[in-house]
């Protein structure tokens, strides 16, 4: 095995962890994937012959990339403020993908999401790396350009805000649910998926149609097609009636879940996911469904059951 093949193999072994770190740092799936891809480019160009812990090295690299992205994001917000002094604006971070905050809210807690957005980049990095991923302050310190003691103080300050103000913010959202459109949209998506699964289990064809966009597309990977050959599963199915027919009277064991932070469903055995169902929801209707059963792909997903 040559150097490039070896590095690619080791990188794939660490990819899921790097995505998790970047996702919790940035609160954005797209930006997290960008950060992970950049870390691969840096690995491919670097001399790692003296690196004994490649996983730790990659974590440090992706953390530095995320820190730069957070600082750039903060700068863009300041520039936006300067360009529109009237206050009648919505920042780019709020509008580039309204699902991102909802995803992070469900995966790590609404209070944590709200407070993470109020932390400065160094505080956020120190808190995420230490409290969520157990990285020692001696390794965090060089990333933020501080001493280990100062890095500890950053995390401690962030932790106090998470534990204190986060609870206050969560209570405010609970007493005024309509005040947060992102949370409201996430709740609506969850209700749609729950209704779809219930209709599938109950064999309610009309309810399935009501949840689906008329032009919905169902995509299944080869492993799913092989599993569903007996019921005529194909790689792509188009149209609400055809898709509803695939689900009517089924999904008995499917459970509501977060799949890489997005509301979906999962079927599993022995505590391990065997099939995931990802949903794209547009204007209150399910516009696309993707079913994955390939073990290699399933191993890359971050799955969290919601209905326990």
Image: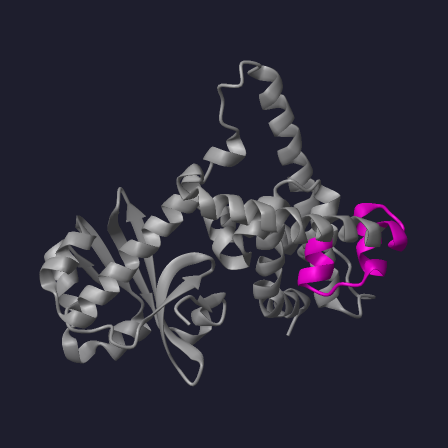
Counting from the top left corner in percent of width and height, residue 223 is at 32, 74
Q: Which of 86/221 is in front?
A: 86
Classify residue 53 by image quadrant.
bottom right
Question: In the rendered structure, which segment of residues is drawn in magenta?
Answer: 127-150
Q: Residue at x 16, y 80 (%)?
A: 230
Residue 191 point in image, percent of width and height:
30, 55
The residue lying furthest to the front in this view is 175
Taking 164 as reference, is 221 above or below it? Answer: below
Colour logic: one colour
- Is residue 36 rendered to the left or right of residue 89? right
Q: Is residue 303 above or below residue 167?
A: below
Q: Is residue 210 magenta?
A: no
**Residue 234 in view of the camera:** no
- Pick the residue in front: 175 or 280: 175
147 is within the stretch colored magenta:
yes
**Magenta stretch prevailing secondary structure:** helix
The answer to whether residue 296 is seen in the rendering is yes
Q: Residue furthest top?
A: 86
Instruction: Name the residue located 70 percent from the left edge and 45 percent from the top edge.
Output: 67
Residue 1 at x, y percent in the picture: 64, 74
> What is the x, y in percent for residue 118?
64, 40
Q: Quadrant of the C terminus?
A: bottom left
Q: Residue at x 26, y 45 (%)?
A: 284
Side of 218 where 232 appears, left or right: left
């Amino acid at each position: 095995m040559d150097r490039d093949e070896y590095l690619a193999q080791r990188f794939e072994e660490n990819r899921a962890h790097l995505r998790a770190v970047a996702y919790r740092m940035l609160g954005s799936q797209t930006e997290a994937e960008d950060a992970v891809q950049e870390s691969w480019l840096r690995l491919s160009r670097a001399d790692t012959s003296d690196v004994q812990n490649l996983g730790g090295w990659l974590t440090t690299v992706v953390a530095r990339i995320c820190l730069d992205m957070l600082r750039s994001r903060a700068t863009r917000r300041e520039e936006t403020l300067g360009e529109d002094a009237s206050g009648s604006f919505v920042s780019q971070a709020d509008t580039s993908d309204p699902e991102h905050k909802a995803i992070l809210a469900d995966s790590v807690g609404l209070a944590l999401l709200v407070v993470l957005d109020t932390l400065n980049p160094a505080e956020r990095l120190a808190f995420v790396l230490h409290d969520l991923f157990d990285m020692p302050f001696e390794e965090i310190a060089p990333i933020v350009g501080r001493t280990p003691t100062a890095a500890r103080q950053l995390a401690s300050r962030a932790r106090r805000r998470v534990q204190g103000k986060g609870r206050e913010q969560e209570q405010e959202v609970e007493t005024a649910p309509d005040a947060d459109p992102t949370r409201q949209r996430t709740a609506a998506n969850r209700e749609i998926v729950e209704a779809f699964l219930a209709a599938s289990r109950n064999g309610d064809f009309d309810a399935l149609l009501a949840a689906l966009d008329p032009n919905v597309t169902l995509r299944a990977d080869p492993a799913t097609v092989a599993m569903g050959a007996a019921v005529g599963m194909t790689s792509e199915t188009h149209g609400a009636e055809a898709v509803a027919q695939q689900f009517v009277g089924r999904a008995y064991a499917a459970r509501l879940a977060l799949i890489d932070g997005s509301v979906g469903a999962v079927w599993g055995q022995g505590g391990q996911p065997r099939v995931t169902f990802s949903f794209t929801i547009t204007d209150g209707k399910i516009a696309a469904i993707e079913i994955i059963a390939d073990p290699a792909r399933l191993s890359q997903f971050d799955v969290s059951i919601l209905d326990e």
